[in-house]
Structures are given as structure tokens and as C-alpha cells.
Amino acid sequence: MDEMQEALSLGFIEQPGKKTEVTSVRLTHDALHAVDALAGMNDKKRSEWLRDVVIEKLMELKRQHEYLSKAFGDSTNTLNTSYTSKTSPVGATTELERS
């Protein structure tokens, strides 16, 4: 499935009859100027260009999440971390000796 089809199936892209919400973003004049220039290069309106960039980032983060979930198996187990251990394995070697 291509990226835009996947974004459409996830509801990230406007679909006829589906509710859409408007949002506003504050950017500096220089940032808006850069966005307008990039949007103009693609013959798009500022809002269309920003929406496309957000969708691309959402898809990137979704793929990253899926990859990490496969690699680490959705694990949230932190019982084996040194934070939950009563004694730190390096505690004995890093403490100063007092005489």
C-alpha cells in the first residue's frame, strides 16, 4: 500500500463526508516566508503544504513505532532495570572509601 493510501485509510487525509478540524499555528515571519517559498515550488497553498508535511511526519512516526514494536515486542517491562533494583550493581565500585 502506498503511503498516501495508507494515510487515507488511517483517516489522516480528508475524506468526503468526514469531519475535519481547523487548527492554527504560530510561526515567525521568517518561517512563514520559508513555508510559502516551499509551497510555491510545489504549486500548493501554504495550508496544503503544511498538512502534507504533517501527514508525512505522522506516517514516519507510525512506521518507526511499528518497527520498534516488532523489534522490542511491545514490551513495557522495566523490572530488570537498575532503577527498580534495591542495590545498584555499580554502587560498590563507585562509593568513596572513608577512613
Image: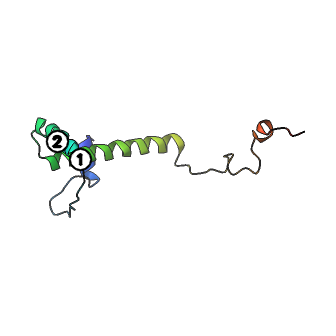
Residue 92's place in the image compared with 78, above or below, is: above
Q: Could you tell whether 92 is left or right of 52 in the image?
A: right
Q: Nearer the viewer, residue 32 or 70?
A: 32
Dot 2 surroundings within 10 Å: few (below 14), some, or many (20 or more)? few
Residue 39, horizontal then vertical, whole percent = 14, 40
Residue 26, horizontal then vertical, whole percent = 25, 53
Please state the total of marks drawn on the protein image. 2
CA gap between label 2 and label 1 equals 9 Å
Q: At label 1, which amino acid type do we have?
A: Thr
Residue ID at (34%, 41%): 60
Reading the image, the residue beneath label 2 is 33
Determine the secondary structure under disc 1: loop
Q: In the displayed orientation, state which residue is furthest to the front.
A: 99
**Residue 95 lies in what quarter of the image?**
top right
Dot 1 surroundings within 10 Å: few (below 14), some, or many (20 or more)? few
Residue ID at (74%, 44%): 88
